Image: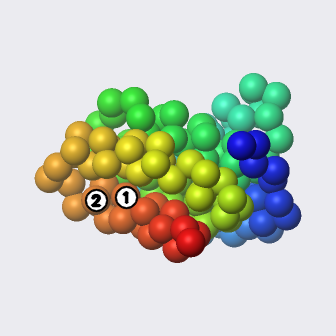
Amino acid sequence: AKVTPTTSDSLHPAELEGLTADLKLKASTPEGRSRLAVLHAVRQAVVERGGEPSCTAYAGALLSSVAQKQDEETTASVVYVLGHVLQHVGPGLLRGKFVPLADVLVATGKGHPESAPVARHILQCIYATIKEQE
């Protein structure tokens, strides 16, 4: 079934600016710099592929990234940003893609079994997804 983007599925400039501003405030830490770099890389990847900046596009790019084997710091940063983006994805998409999303998140957690930051951010993603299920 095709999921039609809703108003809540768009990444409004204010939301993106808010996330960017929040990450810039935390850029004095290595984690903050890594998260900001992830956000900029995702934005660039979406634009280079001719996509419209939306939570759906950002979530897709982030999921593709997190599905690849990466070091703990990068994985934690990608999953952190994904958790924030998922909060703005339309509920229809989260319902329709629950199983594939959960599979990627579980596999990511298994890939970093002793990482508290990865586990914490995965739980935030799962929460954002589960709260939209019926």
Q: Residue furthest left?
A: 114
Q: Circle 2 sits on which residue?
A: 119
Q: Position of residue 91 (x, y in %)?
A: 67, 64
Q: Front-most of 127 and 40?
A: 127
The residue that appears at 46% across and 48% down in the rendered structure is: 99
- Mark 1 lies on a secondary structure that is helix
Quadrant occupied by the N terminus: top right
Given residues 34 and 6, the one toward you in this image is: 6
In the image, residue 70 sits, relative to residue 59, either above or below, namely above
- What colouring style does the render use? rainbow
Q: CA distance from mark 2 to mark 1?
A: 5 Å
In this picture, residue 80 sits left or right of residue 49: left
Instruction: Please state the horizontal and vertical placement of residue 54, each as a whole percent of the image.
Output: 76, 50
Bin the neighbour count of mark 2 within 10 Å (Cα to Cα): few under 14, some 14-19, many 20 and up: many
Apparent side of residue 73 relative to residue 42 in the rendered image (left or right):
left
Q: Residue flagged by tag 2: what amino acid is it?
A: Ala
